[in-house]
Amino acid sequence: MKLNKIGSAIMGILSGNPKDEPLHYGEVYGLFTNLSANNGTISGYQTLINHAGDEDLKKLIEEAIKGLQAENQQLEELLKSNGVGLPPSPPARPNANLEDIPVGARSTDPEISAAISMDTAAALVACSQAMGQSIREDVAMMYGQFHMNKAQFGAKMLKLNKEKGWLIPPPLHISKGTES
């Protein structure tokens, strides 16, 4: 009998407008760590843009920063509306002249592009995990949108890597047919 009362209470909380439903601890943790990771990534990309020489790469880094900032607006709004404090954010990085960075201390364009591509792949997995653990439809849909945006951005990075000759493929499997 007690179980039925608890189940009814839970169903009452979890019906209606998703924004009126409480976040569960996994959702709070995911939102908070996503915001914190985005803050660090933005800071890192602001530094990497100073190292980039290729204009197409710079445009994609700027696009990535803007995308993460847009995500952060949604994440901050959701956390604040649910009474959760926000993680600290590092200050914006200053612009620097590429020529002022010593050659041995510079990141190369292929290294920068590979790092951003890896970040994007990891972010896709994180979005999938957040969607799978969400019980609030609005949170799951938000992460679905983030996932779609990251997949589209990842495709742009792949195209850039191929066009610039920066992609180092693993050994390619070439079928040689079988001899009888």
Image (cartoon, helix red, strand yellow):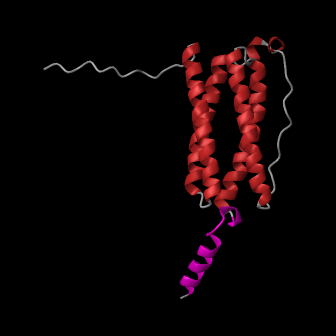
The reply to whether residue 117 is visible in this rendering is yes
Give the quarter of the image for residue 145: top right
Most common secondary structure along the magenta stretch? helix
Q: Looking at this view, is 168 or 54 the one in front?
A: 54
Direction from residue 8 to residue 38 in the image, left or right = right
> Is residue 163 in the magenta section?
no
* Residue 147 place in picture, x, y as percent: 59, 42
The reply to whether residue 84 is visible in this rendering is no
Q: Looking at this view, is 111 or 2 the one in front?
A: 2
Q: Looking at this view, is 149 or 40 the one in front?
A: 149
Against 144, is 82 above or below? below
Magenta residues, start to end: 2-22
Direction from residue 66 to residue 10 in the image, left or right = left
* Residue 127 place in picture, x, y as percent: 60, 46
> Which residue does the image show at 75% across and 23% down from the upper left?
49
User: Which residue, as the protein is rendered here, is positioned at the far left?
Assistant: 180
Against 38, is 1 above or below? below
> Which residue does the image show at 57% across and 57% down from the upper left?
133
> Is residue 4 in the magenta section?
yes
Give the quarter of the image for residue 52: top right
* Residue 98 place in picture, x, y as percent: 80, 14
> Which residue does the image show at 74% across and 33% down from the upper left?
66
Q: Quadrant of the C terminus?
A: top left
Give the quarter of the image for residue 7: bottom right
> Which residue does the image show at 61% across and 40% down from the upper left?
123
